[in-house]
Amino acid sequence: MIGITGSKGVLGRIICQKLESKNIDFSTFNDDIRNETAIFNWLKSDEINYVIHLASKVAVSDVENNIAEAYEVNVSGTINLVKAIGKLDHSMGVFYASTSHVYESSSLPLKETDLINPINSYGLTKRISELLLLDYSTKNKSLNLCIGRIFSFYHESQNPPFLYPNLLNRFQCEDLSKPFKLFGANSTRDFLYAEAVCDRIIDLVIINHVGIVNIASGKSTKIIDFVKSISPVELIFDIDETEKVNHLNADISLLNKILKTNE
């Protein structure tokens, strides 16, 4: 049985739908990830032997504005999951949804072995959880751990303050004949549709892959070009050319090798 934390989030909802369509049994954790007892009871009662751990405070601005809660959910929640797993008497697989934000900005496509230097507090909470899980897995061979470093994804079900829905709202509410103020315009990201992200996660879970792997499109896109691609009209941009530029783009050769794809 596959267990899913964070099933009400964008990726969680999509994964549940996809597992259901594949007739794969799953159970969702519907309590607070900060409640260790609830996690243990869920794992034990539903006889779960694999967990897709998605529960997290994700939006960068939400994390920055609620640091204490972000650490409680992103870090303490992961600790609670590990503690609950440790009380079980059977082996467990875990897919941990990490992020590209653990990497240091680089003009080159980022490999899983590249320098780790979180670019914000969100990335730091995720890196701490990575280290916790990696340390536990080395000491407990009954835990099969896969860490998926997910790069930028977008989906119509997202809500602000994420980039994609925020842009769609601005397109509706602003006068697009006037200069369109855009922060981070010249920074680059690796964008992948959320449905495709979830396909990759499920594929990794099904083969019970162990290790760290980037989940992305493998394509670098300037923020300004992404905005142009979804804008209903041609925009006149208001850009601060002195703004600091950063780059988070993935080398997905490992992912392609694991899943034997040529995408």
Image (spheres, rainbow, N blue to C red):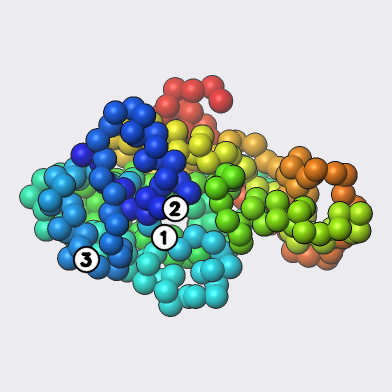
Residue 13 visible in the shown view: yes
Q: What residue sits 67% from the left and 41% below the top?
A: 220
Q: What residue sits 49% from the left and 23% below the top?
A: 261
> Which amino acid, mark 1?
Ser
Would you say the residues marked 1 and 3 are in contact, meaning their CB atoms lie under 8 Å apart? no
Q: Which mark is residue 36?
A: 3
Residue 225 percent across, percent down from the top left = 77, 44
Q: What residue sits 42% from the left and 74% below the top?
A: 69
Nearer-the-camera pick, 12 or 189: 12
Q: Circle 3: is it few (<14), some (14-19), or many (20+) Cα within 10 Å? A: many
Nearer-the-camera pick, 127 or 222: 222
Q: What residue sits 18% from the left and 45% below the top?
A: 48
Q: Secondary structure at mark 1?
A: loop
Q: Circle 1: is it few (<14), some (14-19), or many (20+) Cα within 10 Å? A: many
Q: Earlier in the sequence, mark 1 or mark 2?
A: 2
Q: Is 234 on the left-hand or right-hand side of 251?
A: right
- Vertical comparison of 171 with 214: above or below: below
Q: Is 235 on the left-hand or right-hand side of 111?
A: right
Residue 153 percent across, percent down from the top left = 57, 45
Q: Is 41 on the left-hand or right-hand side of 227?
A: left
Would you say the residues marked 1 and 2 are in contact, meaning their CB atoms lie under 8 Å apart? yes
The Cα atoms of the two marked residues, 2 and 3, are separated by 20 Å
Question: Which quadrant would residue 80 be assigned to in this image?
Answer: bottom left
> Which amino acid, mark 3?
Glu
Residue 135 percent across, percent down from the top left = 28, 57
Q: Which mark is residue 9?
A: 2
